[in-house]
Image (cartoon, rainbow, N blue to C red):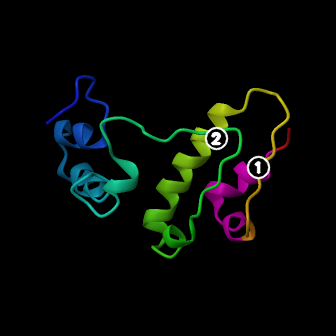
Amino acid sequence: MANASGRSLSDFVSGVQLHEIKDALHHYTVDGPMGQLLDAEEDGLTLGAFQTFEIDQVMNMGERNLVPVLTYLFRRIEKRLDGSPSLIVLDEAWLMLGHPVFHDKICMSG
């Protein structure tokens, strides 16, 4: 059942006509293995003044799963940055520095 705003990934996939897109995104919907992390009727992630994410399990699931999850987390963190002093600690950041998607995010200059 679609939500009122139709903004879940499952809603998007159900409206897409191209089978290539449907097949590529199905993995990340509630019907696929990554749906519990990336698809929902509402975004339930709340960020506090101090937030910790344990991503070791996702890192072991391969790039197909890691990139979308980390992209989502980075985007949510970026949206919170308002110019006030902030500290983002990335344990074992070297793992992400080697990936082109995250290298620029980690090495961005202020």
**Residue 100 placement (x, y as % from top left):** 64, 59
Q: Which mark is residue 88?
A: 1
**Residue 18 placement (x, y as % from top left):** 19, 45
Q: Is 85 drawn above or below residue 92 in the view shown?
A: above
Residue 31 colored in magenta in the image: no
Q: Quadrant of residue 6?
A: top left
Q: In the displayed orientation, state which residue is furthest to the bottom.
A: 60
Secondary structure beneath label 1:
loop
Q: Is residue 89 left or right of residue 54?
A: right
- Residue, x 63% and y 32% (percent of image)? 79
Q: Is 86 drawn above or below residue 98 in the view shown?
A: above
Q: Image quadrant for the C terminus?
A: top right
What residue type is disc 2 on?
Ile
**Residue 34 placement (x, y as % from top left):** 35, 60
Tags 2 and 1 touching, CB below 8 Å:
yes
Label 1 environment density (alpha carbons within 10 Å; few <14, some 14–19, many ≥20) = few
Q: Quadrant of residue 96?
A: bottom right
- Residue, x 73% and y 65% (percent of image)? 91
- Residue, x 70% and y 45% (percent of image)? 50
Label 2 environment density (alpha carbons within 10 Å; few <14, some 14–19, many ≥20) = few
Q: In the displayed orientation, state which residue is furthest to the top.
A: 4
Q: Main secondary structure of the magenta part?
A: helix
Which one is nearer the viewer's eye here, 53 or 71? Answer: 53
Tell me the magenta residue range.
95-108
- Residue, x 20% and y 39% (percent of image)? 16
Q: Which mark is residue 77?
A: 2
Q: Is residue 24 left or right of residue 70?
A: left
Residue 103 colored in magenta in the image: yes
What residue type is disc 1 on?
Ile
